[in-house]
Each structure stands twice: as structure tokens, then as C-alpha cells.
Amino acid sequence: MTCLALHGNQLLLSGGEDGKLCVWDCRSGADSYVLLKMFAIKHSILSISVHEESAKVALTVDSGGYLKAWDL
């Protein structure tokens, strides 16, 4: 895991060295589980930002210098 982004108190997004973006449901506390796993980047994800109001779009920046928009 290379980066995290929290949206409110319900969603946590994690980015990894393998280019995978995961969306976690945090409402269940210690029993959090993955809602989505998406893999479409060849480089490590360095930064994540989630659309503040809707949480329907995330932006990532990877180690190759690319910006990617993810449809959540």
C-alpha cells in the first residue's frame, strides 16, 4: 500500500505498488471489507483524491507521471 484517502467516515481508498485501487467500506468498523478492486495502471499509485460531494470519482497520480480518473 502506497497511499490512502478517506471520504467521510464510510469509504477508504487505498493505492498500491501494483497499480491497484481498492475501495473499502469502513462503516462496519473492524470488519471493514473491500467494495471494489480496480487495476488499470502499470505504475505505483502515489496519490489519491476523491470527489468531495459525490464520492463517485477518484483521481490518482502514479509513479509514471500519469493522472487517471476512476469511475467509482
Image (spheres, helix red, strand yellow):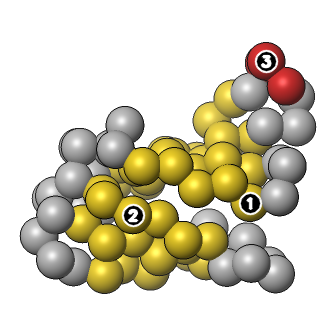
Tag 3 residue: 30
Task: Give the numbered dot on residue 47.
Answer: 2
Which residue sits at x=23%, y=43%? 17
Quarter of the image that includes the C terminus: bottom right
Does residue 20 appear left or right of residue 64 in this picture? right
- Distance from disc 1 to disc 2, alpha carbons, whole Å, reads 14 Å
Q: Residue 51 in the image: x percent, y percent?
A: 67, 79
Which residue sits at x=78%, y=18%? 31
Alpha-carbon neighbours of circle 2 within 10 Å: few (<14), some, or many (≥20)? some
Label 3 vs 2, first from the N-terminus: 3
Name the amino acid type tagged 3.
Ala
Alpha-carbon neighbours of circle 3 within 10 Å: few (<14), some, or many (≥20)? few
Q: Are marks 1 and 2 in contact (CB under 8 Å)?
A: no
Tag 1 residue: 7
Which residue sits at x=47%, y=65%? 48
- Disc 1 on helix, strand or loop? strand
Name the amino acid type tagged 2.
Ser
Name the amino acid type tagged 1.
His
Task: Give the numbered dot on residue 19.
Answer: none
In the figure, 50 relative to 26: above or below? below
